[in-house]
Amino acid sequence: MIKRLVLFRLTACLIFAVPVAARVQETPAPTPSLPASVEKAKRFDPAAATQAWLATVPADKRAKSDAYFEGGYWLILWNFLVIVAISIFLLQSRISARLRDFAERTTAFKAVQIVSYGIPYFILAWVLSFPLNAYERFFREHQYGMATQNFAQWFREELIGLSVTLVAGAILLIALYAVFRRAPRAWWIWGTIVAVVFSSIGNFIAPLYVEPLFNTYKPLEDPAIRDPILAMARANEIPVTQVFQVDASRQTTKISANVAGFLGTTRIALNDNLLKQCTLPEIRSVMAHEMGHYVLNHGIKLTLYFGIFFLVGFALTRALFESAVRRWGNRWGVRGVADPAGLPLLALILSAFFFVLTPFSNTVTRATEREADTFGINTAREADGMAKVALKLGVYRKLDPGPLEEFIFFDHPSGRARIRMAMDWKAAHLPAGDVDPGGPATGYQRSREPPFL
């Protein structure tokens, strides 16, 4: 799965001081045993096998998982409302205009003015949104048993994240406002290009320079785990010679992995929770999925897809921004789009656009995750491993949502959808004449054929 915050969402966070979400994390569930009702089945039935896997999750754990994920629906709304409240406050109180005036008194250089405005803006937004962020990313994670840091450790990492935002956000604002000044009519087109370029650069440097700020990466030494992963990488022409493990257990109990970078920065990494909590078939399943993202160029595709979203959002923002400035610009002290005092207004309009766009942006991401699932199961050939991992991911993601619920809120396929894919694949690959009810306690063995031969 794509553990990197989708890069355009990261770009939006840096521009508009929406705090970057904590790294996605997943908690393990006990390795299930398939119910006897399925063991007694006379032939393999993917639908029945899927339901049997889902039935291995106790009702209390299912209820806890559902509560955690459904609470996230409200957090989407609350995060949006916090952005709206902060933006209106900074405009109505004229704090944004005062920051602009301070920057203009400090220097005559436009780039330095932008930095002098942007840094206080980011810090103010971070402080004002801190109560919700602390609840969402610290207290709530502890409430559901998914966090391992104490508050001091967590707060230290938040400060590191803020520092990254200040540096990257300042650079991005310099580029954007240069576009706003030089292309007052077509800024929405050139602004989109800036966002795409910035996102691509972030994709390049994050594995080498950003992620090590939060975690330690070291080579995975166990050949029983390392060598099968490298074999899959070689078979799919992924240019790596090492597999790295990450000390994510310092922060979370959740499992994760990724294949990230390009142009010489490509790296395969899996967190130590995955090593501790999953079997080799499960690890192979996860890593094959992550390789799918790399081989299928999902990073580039998502950058382009979200670039289209930004293009539409910037076009809408151009019309609404100009209208709002004509009506309230004097009250707010905002002169136009090239005036940094208007940044909260840009944040407000774009945040509203992406809030409404949530089902569609989730669908785009979910489609790439589905493609990576397909690639992963055909590469690892671990149907039961995929099913077990889907249940473990179900600790933080609702396993069996309704169709509309999945369309609106899920940026990954649901656990039910992933298990059904695995069981359909298993049914299609059972040797002719074999009978297998599905699940870990059966006699079915994965094919010995190498991937894609």
Image (tube, rainbow, N blue to C red):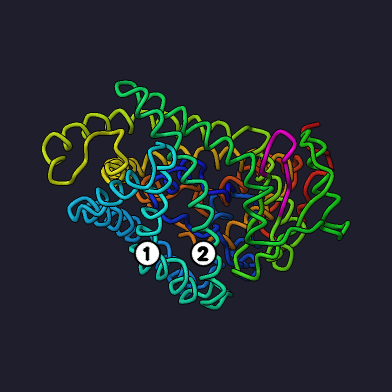
Q: Position of residue 413 (x, y in %)?
A: 50, 47
Q: In the figure, is residue 130 to the left or right of 153?
A: left
For label 2, the SS is helix
Q: Position of residue 110 (x, y in %)?
A: 40, 36
Closer to us: 177 or 412? 177
Q: Is residue 283 visible?
A: yes
The boundaries of the magenta stretch are 260-269
Closer to the N terminus: mark 2 or mark 1?
1
Q: Residue at x 54, y 38 (%)?
A: 368
Quarter of the figure that contains the C terminus: top right
Question: How many neighbours does mark 2 have within 10 angstroms: few (below 14), some (14-19), or many (20 or more)?
Answer: few
Q: In the figure, is residue 198 to the left or right of 441?
A: left
Q: Position of residue 324 (x, y in %)?
A: 16, 37
Closer to us: 322 or 171? 171
Q: Quadrant of residue 275?
A: bottom right
Q: Residue at x 83, y 53 (%)?
A: 226
* Residue 149 lies in the magenta stretch: no
- List the single residue furthest toward the right: 223
Q: Amino acid at mark 1?
A: Val
For label 1, the SS is helix
Picture disc at residue 159: 2
Q: Quadrant of residue 273?
A: bottom right
Picture disc at residue 103: none
Q: Position of residue 298 (x, y in %)?
A: 58, 35
Q: Which residue is mark 1?
A: 127
Q: Residue at x 66, y 47 (%)?
A: 207
Q: Amino acid at mark 2?
A: Leu
Q: Is residue 52 visible?
A: no
Q: Is residue 197 above or below residue 429?
A: above
Question: How many neighbours does mark 1 have within 10 angstroms: few (below 14), some (14-19), or many (20 or more)?
Answer: few
Q: How many marks?
A: 2
Q: Main secondary structure of the magenta part?
A: loop
